[in-house]
Image (tube, grey):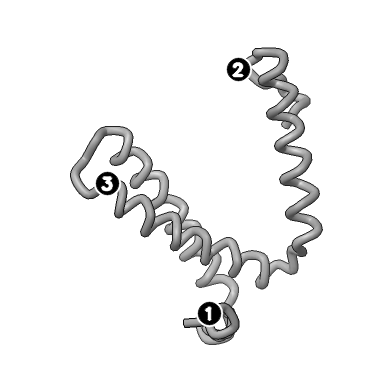
């Protein structure tokens, strides 16, 4: 399936199931990703494939959330830049514990 078709399917799912239901599904998928990371860290069998599956689900959900709540690529890029710069400063300072005002 090409990228345009995928995006069309995702937009249709928002229209069909609605913003509230899709938001709930996104929360559930994030929870499943947390569990998959935990399983991978504990060395469970097939944990890597499960992790990839849950990462795919959350990646799709991020697209849905952008569409539903009007988040632009520019907004995301700005926050990614801020968060990455903050992490860089922390690593340079070798401070593993963030200060409250950094959040």
The C terminus: image quadrant: top right
User: Helix, strand, or loop for circle 2?
Assistant: loop
Q: Which residue is mark 2?
A: 96
Query: Quick one: label 1, few (<14), some, or many (20+) residues within 10 Å?
Result: few
Q: Quadrant of residue 35?
A: top left
Single out the residue that lies furthest toward the top.
94
Image point (52%, 81%), residue name: 2
Q: Is residue 9 above or below residue 103?
A: below
Image-based side of 39 in relation to 75, left or right: left
Q: Is residue 35 above or below residue 14?
A: above
Query: Quick one: label 2, few (<14), some, or many (20+) residues within 10 Å?
Result: few
Q: Which residue is mark 3?
A: 47
Q: Is residue 87 above or below residue 75?
A: above
Marks 1 and 3, Cα distance to the nearest angstrom?
A: 26 Å
Query: Quick one: label 3, few (<14), some, or many (20+) residues within 10 Å?
Result: some
Image-based side of 90 in relation to 22, left or right: right
Q: Going from the N terminus, do you reach mark 1 or mark 3 first?
A: 1
Q: Which residue is mark 1?
A: 6
Image point (60%, 67%), residue name: 63
Q: Nearer the viewer, residue 44 or 30?
A: 44
Image point (80%, 59%), residue name: 74
- x and y percent of residue 34 in the render? 41, 44
Marks 2 and 1, Cα distance to the nearest angstrom?
A: 39 Å
Image point (31%, 40%), residue name: 40
């Amino acid at each position: 399936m090409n990228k345009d078709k995928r995006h069309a399917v995702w937009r249709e799912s928002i229209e069909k199931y609605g913003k509230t239901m899709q938001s709930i599904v996104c929360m559930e998928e994030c929870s499943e990703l947390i569990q998959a990371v935990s399983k991978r860290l504990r060395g469970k069998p097939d944990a890597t494939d499960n992790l990839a599956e849950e990462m795919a689900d959350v990646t799709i959900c991020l697209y849905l959330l952008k569409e539903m709540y009007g988040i632009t690529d520019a907004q995301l890029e700005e926050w990614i830049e801020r968060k990455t710069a903050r992490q860089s400063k922390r690593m340079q300072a070798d401070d593993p514990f963030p200060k409250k005002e950094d959040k």
